[in-house]
Image: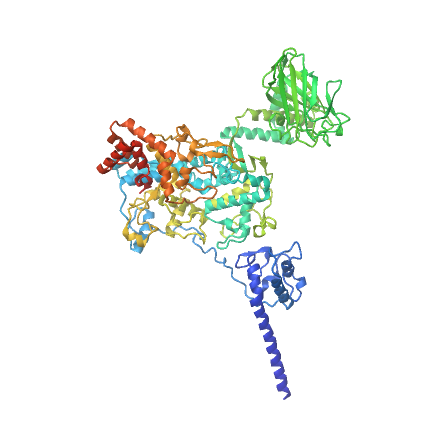
Amino acid sequence: MKDILVSCFLLSLLTSVSSGFADDNAFFRESVEPILKEHCYECHSHSAGLMEGGLTLDWQSGWKKGGTRGPAIMPGQPEQSLLIKAVQHTDPELQMPDTKLSDQEIAILVRWVKQGAVDPRNTKPVSENDNATDWWSLKPLQRPSVPTVQAGNPIDAFIQTRLKAEGISASPPADRHTLLRRLTSDLHGMHLVLADVAAFKNDTAPDAYARMVDRLLESPHYGERWARHWLDTVHFADSHGFEHDVFRPHAWRYRDYVINRLNADVPWSQFIREQLAVDYFFPERSELMPALGFLGAGPYDQSAAATAPKSFEYLDRDDLVTQTMGAFVSTTANCARCHTHKFDPITQADYFALQAVFAGIGKGDVSFDADPQVAAKREHWKALKTAALTQSSEVLLLPENQKLVAEWEQTRRPQPRWETLQPDVFVSTHGAKLKRLPDGSILSEGKPTDQETVVVTGNTNLSTVTAIRLDVLTDDSLPHKGPGRAHNGNLHLSEFELQLFPPNASAGTVIPIRRATADFNQDGWTIEHAIDGNLKTAWGIYPKVSVGHFAIFEPELALKVEPDTRIVVTLKQLHGGAHTIGRFKLSVTDSANLDVLALPAEAETVLSLPESQRTSTQQLSLSSLVLKYRAEQEIKQLPPQDKVYAAAAEAVNERGMVRYSQPREIHLLARGDLEKPREIVPPGALTALSPLPGRFDLPQSHPEAARRAALADWLADSRNPLTWRSIANRVWHYHFGKGLCDTPNDFGRMGGTPSHPELLDWLACELRDHNGSLKHLHRLICNSNTYRQSSASRSDLVKQDPENRLLARMSRRRLDADSYRDAVLLVSGELDLKQGGPGDSHFTTTPGPQVTPVLHYDQFDLNRPDAHRRSIYRVVWRGIPDPLMDALDFPDLGLLSPTRSFSVSPLQSLVLLNNRFVLHFAQKMAERAAKSKSNLSDQIRQVIRWTWLREPTPDELNQMTVLAQQHGLESVCRLVLNSNEFLFVE
C-alpha cells in the first residue's frame, strides 16, 4: 500500500511539472514570441538576413550566445538582462527598438525572463535568403548551346524554338522601305530621306542589308542616338534639380564623352572602368577625364548641401549607389539602406560598403587638360612644385633640376633700386589709427579691428613704374612683433588693388596686376590670392612671424607717370579675426629688366656665395625657391584647363573648392538612421556573388580612386553574371521596345523574369566574349530574321501573346520625343548636324525668386541657328521641362529612366498640333516645298515624299489639295507631322 502511495505521489509530481512546462511554452508562444517577431526580428533574425551586433532572437541559442555585448538574457534575472534594459530604455546607449514598447509588452518580457526564459525554439531557423542566390540573374553565366534548328542566326534559333513549342509561326519579313526606316530609327534616331530609300531598294546584292547595318553603325549619328539611351539610364541632365535647380555649364562634356566612346565601340568593361575611375586606370589619358561626369550625372541638392551637409552627403551617395548598381548590374541595392533587402541577397552591410566606395568624392566642376601632352607638362611642373614645397632633395638636386637653378642664376638680373612711395594720404575704412613713421612706413595703432581696408595715396619722382613693392614690417607694439595684428602675429591680405590718377583726372584708372611674388607664402595662402579677385582668399605669412616679409606686384604694362600723378594702393584685409597688417611700407621701381622673384634674406646670402662654397642645405634651400618659382611660371604659361561637371576628390562648386584628403568613415546605420551609427564598413560590393569579393582588399593607405577602381573591376569582371546580362538586355530593349527581361534596372525577385532566359545568357556571353563590343551585338540583332519581321498585327497572337513577348512579329513603336523633334527639323530642311560642344538652350531666362531661374520656352527665337541641332545637344533642365518634349514622354531625369513611358492623351494631340515648334517648322516645310515646286499638287507630293517617304495616293492628294487651298500649304504640313505614318515606326 505504501508503494502505491509513493507511486501516485511521483506521478502527480511529474504531471505537475509537465503541466508547468506546457504552461510556460504556451505563454512563450502566445505572449512573448509575437512581441519578438513584431519588434525585434527585423534586425535580429535569420528571416531578415540581419543580425545587428551579432545578436539573433529567433531561437534559444541566439539569445544565450548573444552578440558583441554578450548574452542577451540572464534567465531569472531581468534586471541583469540586456534585452530587458534595451526595451525599458533605461540606458541611453542601449535603447531598442527605437519606439519604446508599451508597458504591457515590457511587463510580459520581464515576467518571461523572471520565470526562467523558457524558450522551446531549439532548432536553428532557416534563412529565407539561404537559397537567395538560386535566382536566374545571380546564377553563374554560362554559354548555352544554340538550338539545332535551321536558322543562320543564333538569335533566330532560340526564338524559333520557343515559337515552335508554343505552336506559333513567325511573321514574314518586312519590306525594304520598312526595314530601312526601322534600322535608321533604331541606330540613328533619325528620319530617312527618299533618296536613301530608293538607293536601298535598288541595291539587289545579297549583302545589301548587312552592308546597310554596317554603314549605319559606322556613322557618328549612331553614338548620338545610343548616348541618349545611356544618359536616360544614368539620369543625366544639365541642371541640379531640387529646390535650387542651378545650371551646370560644363556638364555637356560628359555627354560628348559618351557619344564619342560609343562611336569608338570601346569595350564595355573599359566603358565601366572609365566612368567610375578613369583617373586611376588611365591617368595619362587626360582627354578621357569627362568620363567622371558619370559620377556627377544625377541631381544635387544645393540647399541641403548648405543647410544639412551630413544628411545631404548620405543621400547624395545613396543616389550614386542607386545609379551605379541600377545602370551596370540592374540591381536595387538601395533597398538595403535601412535593412537587409527584403527579397534579394543584399545585406545592409553590402549597401554601406557601396557607399564607402564613394566616400571620398564630391560633386562640382573638375578641371582637366584635353590635350594629353599639356597634361603631362602640367603634371611634371606640379610634381616639381610639390618637391620644392617639401624640399625633397631626391628631386630638387637631380642634375636636370640643378641645371634649371644654374640657368636662373646666370640670367638673374641685378636687383632693382626701390624708391619709397611717399604717402600723402592714408586712411582706414574700419577706424584703425594710422601713423606715418620717419622711414615712410605706416603703423596701425589702437584696438585691432576685425577687418581692415587701407587706402594709400602717394607720389613718386619716377617717370616710369614697373613694379610696386609691399613690405610688411615688424614693430615692438605688435603681437609677436607682427608683422600682422592677429594674436599670433599673422596677417591676411585679401586683395591688392592699384589705381593711377593723372593730373586733373576726374576718375582713376584701374591697373591690372599680371604677376605677384613674395619672399614667403603660408601654406594655402599664397600671394597669388591677393590678386585673384576673390575676397575669400588671401596672402598669409604664418608661421614665419616676428620677421618682416615683402611682396612684389608687377602691372600688365609699365606705368607712365606724369608729374603730379597720384598712385593709389588699396590693401583689403577682410578675412576677419584681426588678421590685418600692423606695419607696412610701399616702394616703386623703374627697373626695365625686373627680376620679380622675391627672395628672403637667407637666399640672398646663399647667392652671394660661389656654388662651391655652399653647403648642401643652402643649395637645397635656394633650389626649392627657384624651382618653385620656375614651376609656377611654367604652369601659368600652359593653356587654361577645361572643366567637366563630375565628382572627384577635388571639385569646385558653390561652396568653393571641395577637397577630401581621405575618404570619410562609413558606418552601418541602424535602420538607416544617421543618429545611430554602428560599426565601420569598408568599401565593397555584394557578398552573395561568389567568387567575386564582397569586400575589397585594399592597402591601408590606398588612394581614394582605388576604391572606385575596385568597384569598377568588380563590375567589369567576366565572372559577374549581372553586368553582362544587364547590358545585353538593355541593347535588346532598345531594339525591340522591351527587354527579354522587362525590368531593365531590376533583375531581382521584384523585377521581371526573362521571356527567353537561354537567349539572354547567350547574348550576354556573346557580348562578353567579343571584347564587350556593343556594335557586335547590334549586328547580330539587326541581321536576325526576328528583327526583320513584319510588325503587322495578327489576330492569332491577340490571345496567345498579346504583349508580343514571344516575338512572332516586330513591335510597332512611336517616335520618342528626341526622334520626333529631329525628324521635324529634317523634313523642314532646317536640321543642323553640327556635333558636340556646349548644349543649346531652347529658352530664355529671367531671375526666379531664389537661385532657380524662370525658363521661358515660349519666348525662344526658333530661327536661331542653335535651335536646329539634334535633340541630344539640347540643354535639359532637370526640374523645368520643355512642354513639347514633356508631352512626348521625355523622362523626368530627377529619377533613373531605364525605360520611357508611352502615353496617349488629348493634351498630347493638342501639343503636337499647336505647339509653336510644330507650327514654326510646318511653316518652314511649306516654304521649302514652295521653293522646290511651283505647282500646288507637286508641292504636296514633295511634302508627302519627305514625311511618308512615298508618293501620295490619288485620294490623299485630292483631299490634301482641298485642305491646302482652304487653309494653306502649312496646314498640310501640320497634318502629316501629326499622322501615324510619320509618328510610328513599323
Q: How many marks?
A: 0
In this rendered view, identify the residue nearer to me: 97 or 785: 97
In this rendered view, identify the residue nearer to me: 578 or 205: 578
* Image location (x, y in percent) of residue 204: 24, 37
Left/right of residue 437 with respect to residue 352 in the rendered view: right
Residue most extreme to the bottom: 1
Question: Which image quarter is the C terminus in?
Answer: top left
Left/right of residue 326 with respect to residue 831 in the rendered view: right
Residue 207: in sight, yes or no?
A: no
The residue positioned 30% from the left and 40% from the top of the image is 981
User: Which image quadrant is residue 860 in?
Assistant: top left
Question: Which image quarter is the N terminus in?
Answer: bottom right
Question: In the picture shown, does residue 362 fall above or below 567?
Answer: below
Residue 328: in sight, yes or no?
A: yes
The residue positioned 36% from the left and 30% from the top of the image is 830
* Image location (x, y in percent) of residue 97: 60, 57
Question: In the picture shown, does residue 559 fall above or below 262?
Answer: above
Left/right of residue 75 with respect to residue 234 in the rendered view: right
* Image location (x, y in percent) of residue 338: 55, 51
* Image location (x, y in percent) of residue 234: 46, 42
Residue most extreme to the right: 476
